[in-house]
Amino acid sequence: MSVTKKAVEKKATRAAFGDEIVRLGESNKDIYVVDIDIGKSCKTDKFIEKFPMQHINVGIAEQNGAGIAAGLATTGKIPFISTYAVFGSLRMAEQIRQEVCYPNLNVKIACSHGGLTPGNDGGSHQAIEDMGVMRSFPNMTVIMGADYHSTRKLIAEAAAMYGPVYLRFTRDAVPMIYDENETFEIGKAKKLRDGEDIAIIANGDTVRLAIEAAEQLEQNGISVKLLDMHTIKPLDVEAVKDCLDIGRIITVEDHNILNGLGSAVAEVIAEAGKGQLARIGVQDRFGESAPYEKLLEINGITVEDIIAKANQLLTN
Amino acid sequence: MFSTPLVIQVYKYMSLQEDHLGTGVWHMQQTSVEQLKQHAIELRKTAVTMVYEAQSGHPGGSLSAADVISALYFRELNVDPTNPKWEDRDRFVLSKGHVAPIQYAALALRGFVSNESVYTLRQYGSPFQGHPDMKKCPGIDISTGSLGQGLSCAVGMAIAGQRDEKDYRVFAMVGDGECQEGQIWEAIQAAVKYKLDNLIVFVDNNRLQIDGFCEDVMPLLDLEKKFDAFGFDTTRIDGHSMEQIVETLDTFAKQKNGKPKCIVCDTVKGKGVSYMEDQAAWHGTAPNKEEFELAIKELEGGLPV
Ligand SMILES: Cc1ncc(C[n+]2csc(CCOP(=O)(O)OP(=O)(O)O)c2C)c(N)n1
Ligand SMILES: [Mg+2]
């Protein structure tokens, strides 16, 4: 895999949704967007302009939006519900369970404002439990891309597969990591680095932090294996098992340490009965208004924290 | 897009009988009011028997819905039992999914499934789940069971039909108690916004829910006025008068005027079985042997006018 060196360029992954959904809508008239009055913020404006007949805005009525999407899907449409993660995973959680996952309908839930990225909006808008909730529903696939290009690719993959998918995006700009031509497969971890001393498994907007931590660790002679686990369900169990020989594993996520990536990896490790795990993520606490980076810092989700955890595991 | 193996499996499971399949197009417009009434009695008997056999299920709301269901399945719905997923079919969404037995009874009599198979209601492996399951049972257009949600799905289907310039219509049935769910009113707003005159909503206004009369649990006020105020074309009929149901379907429901339709049907919960009528206790209770036999006897005697 090729990591672009000019890691300075930044883009929010919600922009990836805005761009990719237009590309998809162009080639497939069954692609629909169901907006819930936050189209502008979720970047569906270009889609609306180009494909008004493939667009629905249900107003501020998430539950109905989910039901309408399910109804559309029964007729062969591929609706993308677009909203914020906190509403897309919680206000319509039961509708997604009953009318999307239970009948296994081809509905995609595309959510901006994942994790702590809507920093200044405060704790009410920071979705820290969304992926955990979605992971609990049978038939559901749960994805968060690490950057603009990978998110676009994963959205395209989600549109191409049959079944419910929960996609989570950042509100804030995050560094570009991948080359435009990099390919991604749902349910298959992307190996960013191979190493022997420690394995770091990250996803979403924390992958960038893991990359930096890995580089610094390497400079100190610690060999790091690094995985971008963009899909937390179905989890790439084999990729996790491949880390068991290293034995020291750190998960990093912009999500509650309960029920997200860390928990999913912990399940594999516990069942295997070997390996040591440290989970970095939101410390089971609600957020507050603050810059996104500050919130990461409060929760111990920084490059320094990853390095410190690595050193801790190595001295154990 | 639907996994055919599942459907085939269901058919196999039910060992469909020849006489109920492949009968081709049902000459619906020729079904007389008298026949529809007769069918409604059959549906009631089948539904009560299903609940009795399962010793579980919801007789009250099945019986109140029976006449509308009969009119829909034997006169109105443009569906093909030999091709349940035919893309141009009319849709029917039973938003009050707990009364699945009355829909299963109609699916059997209409030839989607065999008559005998429906008595596996609520058993392990049965396509006839406690609440309608589109993955398991042919003829079910959307899975329901959680109240307040089906109508939104019906709206989605109607939007798709409109955008695809299809002639199919979408019929939905909601309970009066179900109308206490906020999502119902969200769906209504959307139906009006999108001018879905291909959507026809029946309210089974039987005045009861689980805990008693809706009036006491949470008053719904005048549902006809409420739907009207939200922008629906609304009418109110006796939901047990086959004449009124047919008349309403033939005229009111067919108007292509850019407005979704609502038919508030005044009904009696438990209709046709004297001891069940107007009794909240028969919402979700199965009859014992004696009660069952009395119910069948009463139903065979026909409905009192
Ligand atoms: C969301 C939800 N809450 C509660 C229930 C449990 N429940 C099943 S039937 C029912 C009462 C329904 O009353 P109504 O809509 O009037 O139906 P009917 O009288 O026709 O049976 C309730 C509360 C449910 N199925 N779904
Ligand atoms: Mg009722």
Image (cartoon, coloured by chain):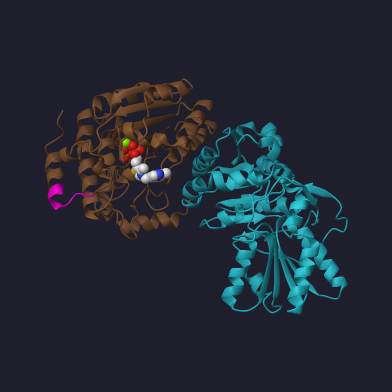
Chain colours: A cyan, B brown
Residue A194 in the image, given as x and y percentages of width and height: 77, 72
Residue B141: x and y in percent read: 42, 43
Residue A221 visible in the current orientation: yes
The answer to whether B207 appears left or right of B168 in the picture is left
Q: Residue at x 31, y 55 (%)?
A: B122
Q: Is residue B291 magenta?
A: yes
Q: Position of residue B97 (x, y in %)?
A: 36, 43
- The region drawn magenta spans B286-292
> Can residue B26 be seen from the camera position used here?
no
Horizontal side, residue A37 vs residue B44: left or right:
right
Q: Residue at x 87, y 73 (%)?
A: A220
Quarter of image, ligand 1: top left
Residue B252 occupies quadrant: top left
| Residue shown at 34% from the left, 45% from the top | B98
| Most foreground residue, B88 or A99 | A99
Where is A224 relative to A282, above or below?
Answer: below
Residue drawn at 55 percent across, 42 percent down: A77
- Image coordinates of residue A184 in percent, x first then y, are 70, 59
Would you say residue B8 sits in the magenta stretch? Answer: no
Asked if residue A138 is positioned above or below residue B139 in the image, the reply reads below
